[in-house]
Amino acid sequence: MENPYLPYPVRIDSVITETEDRNLKTFKLVFLNSEDSEKFVHRAGQFAELSIAGKGEIPIGIASSPTEQGHLLFTVNKVGLVTSALHQMAVGEVMGVRGPLGNWYPWEEMDGKNVVIIGGGFAFTTLRASIVYMLHPENRSRFGDVTVIYGARTPGMLLYKDELAAWDERDDIRMHITVDASDDPDWKYNVGFVPTITQEKAPSAEDAYAIVCGPPIMIKFTLPILSELGFPPERIIMSLEMRMKCGIGMCGRCNIGTEYVCNDGPVFSLDQLGQLPNEY
Amino acid sequence: MTDKMVKKADLNELLNRLLEDYRVFAPVRRGDITTFQQISAADEPDFSCTNTILSPKSLMLPQSECLFDFTLEKGSDMAGIMREIDKDYSPRVIFGIRPCDAQSFQLLDLNFDTSPYRDPWWVRRRHHTTLVGLGCNVPCSTCFCTSVGGSPFAEDGLDLLLTDVGDEFALQAITEKGEQLLTKTGIDTEPSAATAKAVLACKESALGLMRSSVPTNNLEKHDATALFNADFWDKVQFACINCGICTYVCPTCWCFDIQDEVRKNNGVRLRNWDSCMSPLFTLHGSGHNPRNEKLQRVRQRFMHKLKYFVDKYERGVACVGCGRCVEQCPVNIDIREVVRLMNQFKV
Amino acid sequence: MQSYRTKIFEIALQLLVERQVDAVLGFRRGTIPMMSQPILISSPDEVDQLHWDSFCSSNLANYLPRRKDRVAVFAKGCDSRNIILQILENQIKREQLYIIGVPCQGMVDRRKVLAALDGREPADVSERNGMIRVSGWNFKENFSRDEYLQENCAICTHRNPVIYDELAAEPTNEQREVDRYGDIHALEAMNDDDRWQHFEEILTPCIRCYACRNACPMCYCPTCFVDESTPQWLGKSIDPIDTRTFHFLRAFHLAGRCTDCGNCERACPMGIKVRQLTKKLEKDIKQLYAYEAGLSLDEPPPLDTYRPDDPQEFIR
């Protein structure tokens, strides 16, 4: 019997400090055993439990796309015990990964549709995975327009800056990068909160899905705008966070009503969430 | 399936036979408290207690259990890597388990033995354990098993059922596992007609002695969010002191925590019982807590057992009516009252 | 008890009708024999739910910290002492409270009665003339109230409320000839090894449900040290070291603040004698500082204050 609690051993291959406050780092992890790597087949939107012996585990969205082979990327905000320990770890050290866990963005449903990605702050990780996945030559033709609205407090707080710039140069993806404020005279993108930019750029709801990830305040103000633009609740897709332990729907803490965020989620449509108790 | 009988005077002999082939767990009394313990001698068990304060769930889901171990020794190939631990999965028997507690294991199977994930420790323990039940001649006044799909002599979930008919126990094998155990005991006395009659009388009289019942017929019909937003939760929660008694004594409360502990360079990953009554249960790293208020936690406990579970698995409530929480709650929060409120709820 | 009940209705009704308080904190009769439930009522229509008997032993002060409204609260001697401490420790304001003092005859220990019944289950329990009358399936028994009191009640020397706005009955005679520290003297007489062994034994059944802590009106810390995660002071398994650490540290935190209301032992499902720890510290505080917790609004617990003449030989 496979033990779903047993992490795959991985080695830290590289660490990139993403943001100017140094609170976000991206860890590139490589499996110690190639057969584990083969077993770990994920879809964009799923997460994994990162395991640090002696500290515990933490659920983190997978930032690498399934199309990026041979390694996994996780961008981790330094918050508590496990993430602080992880931030102290160096290239070459061994840790664990358990997953992939949870469901994914509705790729089957979104086939042939336009996709609007709206992200804020450090909640851009599985959105990065999604963008890389959609832009992959094998996949790009399966989607219509791909629009991205991504904001952070300042230019220095944006994740994946080089990739953002590269995507901005492409003509098969529409990028709207924004910051709340900037004192950089060379800032060439938008200034304004994500909801405002969403309203301004008004991505069409026709035949489109919106995937929204960000801090609660951003979500709160973005959802009404998406509704105004004509996105029905079943085509507004969100990914939730909860305190988790097992990640496989057994330990009992991450439920919203009948649904375990770890196993039945973390991806829910606004329509699904509307039918659940408001407790998240 | 086979029926046998054994004189009470010969029970020790039966247990001694079992001790040769199984690890035997049974209710053992220390002072005023009876708990399920592994026994090494046939005279240790005490079957006089109807419902032990703690259910035997710890035999399937220990309050604290080591899942993995690891070393942090610098330079070791295995540093930081979780290793599975050998555990004793030799055959064992829980002797004298009450039918409600056996039923609770079946409900917990829905959580632990799932697809695609199977909890390996739960599944193995279930597999290597034979459940020898003892029917309840005199149910406790707080028992309400008959309201939640059970009964004092329910066979469902048991491998073998014992009925105390005075000077003897009637033994009824229910499953193949039970048959095997019965064979190993070497007991070959068929129950007399009088014993068979006494068994029926016990079952009937026990049903007559059930003193509480609660209606659960409407629970599945209610809208979960309406029930969630009901006014009565404020009254239900007031007295609660937010301790973990109800969740720890409950045979169907399975929620757990995973923790690492390290001493010098050696560590273990543990699984511990957790309680939805604790604010820490749902506290995010960011400080946000979806169930920060006592009302939310009390509501979660009852909604989980009596509504979410009902809707998710369509196998009834996650309560076997053992009455332990009713008996042990220091401020008398009575699940039977809450079931009534929930069942009769009108928007 | 009937006279108490009548008086309790009258007082609560008047307070609510005249809107002197927003709510009344009292007891209702339990759903099982020998049990009661704390309730908060805010409407005169609900007054008939109020109840008083020898099983209203929960400490209602436990429901006061951080309340914002003005409440009337029924207070036995111990409850009133905890209220004083909570006022001193800024958990509630005196002007928020209308304290209805209930002189107490001691509360009856439900578990002691159950143990005496030895498995026979009580269906009906009533009280008259100092006797507890218990009946059930095929039996009737009478128990003398005084012999079945909670242990803390049997040695209580403050049965009358210390602070109140109104009394629900005439003050009762205080017990003067009781030895509060018999068991503690025995503990002190043990050698270190035996005493350690003794504590290990009494704490072994602990399941870390924290009912003792949560039942305690003085355990109101927003985050208890056992729940801190950064740093995490102690493990969450049932490792005996962690269990002992919890009980010992909790007891120390209650030094000079515990009124021996007994709510901890009453709540413990495993019958652990937690009071042996708190009572030893109560005795030490009494010897060192001549202080008894919660007797005066002018005297905060000695470990909450600093005075140059405090004993200090022990912190060399």
Image (cartoon, coloured by chain):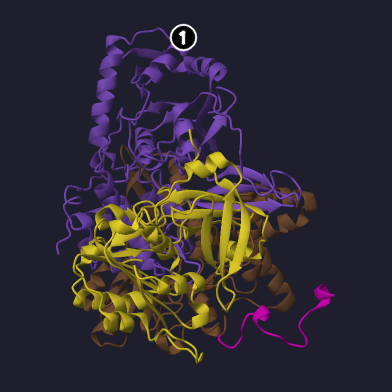
Using the image, name the chain to which the residue with label 1 belongs: B
Judge from the rendering whether residue B10 lies leftward or rightward of residue A173; answer left or right. right
- Residue C127: x, y in percent? 36, 57
Residue span colored magenta: C297-316
Judge the density around disc 1: few (<14), some (14-19), many (≥20) Cα neighbours within 10 Å: few
Q: Colour of chain C?
A: brown
What residue sits right under mark 1 in the picture? B186
Q: Colour of chain B?
A: purple
- Whether the magenta-drawn stretch holds residue A274 is answered as no
Residue A111 position by quadrant: bottom left
Where B93 falls versus C55 (above or below)?
above
- Residue A263: x, y in percent? 38, 51
Q: Amino acid at mark 1?
A: Gly
**What kind of element bears circle 1?**
loop
Where C294 falls versus A254 (above or below)?
below
Question: Which residue is found at the position 14% from the left and 64% from the top?
Answer: B347
Most common secondary structure along the magenta stretch:
loop
How many badges with numbers are in the image?
Answer: 1
Question: Which residue is found at the position 32% from the left and 51% from the top?
Answer: B305
Q: Colour of chain A?
A: yellow
Using the rendered image of the protein, determine whether residue C245 is visible from the camera's viewpoint.
yes
